[in-house]
Image (tube, rainbow, N blue to C red):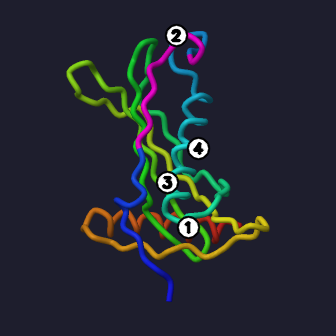
Amino acid sequence: MRPTKKVSDSYTEQVQILTQQNMNGFGRLFGGALMSWIDIVAAVVARRHSNRNVTTAYVSELSFKAPAHANDTVILCGHICYVGRTSMDVCVTSYVENLDGTRLLINNAYLTMVAMDENDVPCEVPLLEIETEEQRLEYEEALKRRNMRKRDR
């Protein structure tokens, strides 16, 4: 029987203060830099859940909601929202955090990560223990995204 883990067991946050090296020609956060950070956060979440090395298999959604500017504090929050046999769907939500602590959503992304064994072969991951109604709804939405991907192959 596969072990289970909770969403909270692999929750991850990353914090960045934006510098000029992360800016595009319009003085906003370069989308590619944010995408790289999102991939790293998703990998950490998936590694924590699976206790394995992981690889990114799919980005099913990546939506930019608002810009971030130089000297902004950007917070990336990642959590597991679905688990298959060897794959894990991870949600990474990114915010600009103001000096008073309020947060403005700037990006939402869903990535599918696959756990790999010592021979770089996909391997089983722990099941996901759903604890809240919000987690259950997010699990169902992830299942819908997964089924649409399979249908579109």
Q: Quadrant of residue 67?
A: top left
- Kind of residue at badge 3: Val
Q: Determine which residue is flagged by label 3.
A: 45
- Magenta stretch in the rendered image: 13-22
- Kind of residue at badge 4: Asp
- The span from disc 4 to disc 1 (Cα, nearest Å) is 18 Å
Q: Determine which residue is flagged by label 2.
A: 27
Estimate the x, y position of residue 21 in percent, counting from the top left: 60, 14
- The span from disc 3 to disc 1 (Cα, nearest Å) is 19 Å
The label number, if any, that marks residue 146 in the structure image: 1
Q: Is disc 3 placed on a helix, strand or loop?
A: helix
Q: Which tag, 4 or 2, sits closer to the chain's start?
A: 2
Check whether the beta carbons of the residues at disc 4 and disc 1 lie within 8 A of each other: no
Q: Determine which residue is flagged by label 4.
A: 39
Q: Is residue 19 above or below residue 44?
A: above
> Which dot, 3 or 4, sits closer to the camera?
3
- The span from disc 3 to disc 2 (Cα, nearest Å) is 30 Å
